[in-house]
Image (cartoon, rainbow, N blue to C red):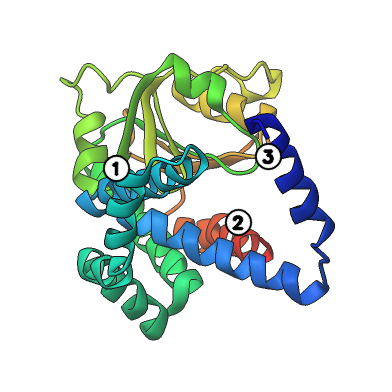
Amino acid sequence: MNVNDFLHNFVTEYYSSISFSFSDIVDILIVTFILYRFFLIIKGTLAFQMFFGIFFLFVAFYFAQLYSLFTIRWLIQNFLAFWIIALLIIFQPELRRTLAEVGQRGFFKKRQMQDERMLEEILKATAAMAESNTGAIIVLERNTGLRNYREKGSILNADISSELLRAIFYPENPLHDGAVIINQNKIESAACFLPLSKNPQLGRAAGSRHRASIGITEESDALVIVVSEETGKTSLALDGKLQADLNIDSMRKILTKLYLQKQNKGIKRK
């Protein structure tokens, strides 16, 4: 029997014996979610690289059995005899951190707390820039993708902090001219140029910074925080309109309702 016949018979016999029930589907979804969360936790760590090394051993073992490579099969079989213990030792920090997160606040609660911290960092930076009359445009991406505008700016993909936002919009910084786009708790891009609103009702009083903020909300459902360089006043653009001269508390209430709550509802639905 050649390899093609072997694979054909294996697939035919395997799938003919499978019968799915609702509980099987739920079981698969739960395991998939747990593995997904685990991969997110170990991503960028040494354990992530070691995981792929172990996966390579399983692939090698499959081909060793398929092509009767006795020496390789013997070596891998001896390794598999204690692979569970090895995995527990290798991934001990990641497993401990995962179980701690589940026990203390759960995955959804953790994401909610991250969103709240993100918002506070943005508001902290906004207040500081308003006090120093530092012009700024901060775009919060929601359902409508802004990839075209993100890619035309300078890609950062950086964690959000008040210090970083203030540094970006510092007048001597080459990235200060343009907008920052925030997506999925990351500063995706800086120095992004947005479309100017063509609404004739805005009048000459609206500068290019405010026109750009309104313009992007005419094309998307984004929320845009604007700090005026001339007056230091803070405004919020949404749905093609500008809520001008908001204090930080008022802005916090609006963003919590329109951004944070909507983000968390979307996660729970998924």
- Residue depicted at x 82% and y 72%: 21
Task: Pick whichever of labels 2 and 1 is earlier in the sequence.
Answer: 1
Where the N terminus falls, by quadrant? top right
What secondary structure is found at the residue carrying circle 2? Answer: helix
Task: Pick whichever of labels 2 and 3 is earlier in the sequence.
Answer: 3
Q: Residue furthest front?
A: 1
* Visible residue check, residue 121: no
From this view, report whether residue 140 is shown above or below residue 267: above
What secondary structure is found at the residue carrying circle 3? Answer: helix
Mark identifier at residue 6: 3
Q: Mark 3 is on which residue type?
A: Phe
Real-space Cα distance between discs 2 and 1? Answer: 22 Å
Q: Position of residue 110 (x, y in %)?
A: 41, 70
Q: Mark 1 is on which residue type?
A: Ala
Real-space Cα distance between discs 2 and 3? Answer: 57 Å
Q: Position of residue 200 (x, y in %)?
A: 69, 18
Nearest the camera: 267 or 143? 267
Where the C terminus falls, by quadrant? bottom right
- Residue depicted at x 25% and y 54%: 47
Nearer to us: label 1 or label 3: 3
Mark identifier at residue 258: 2
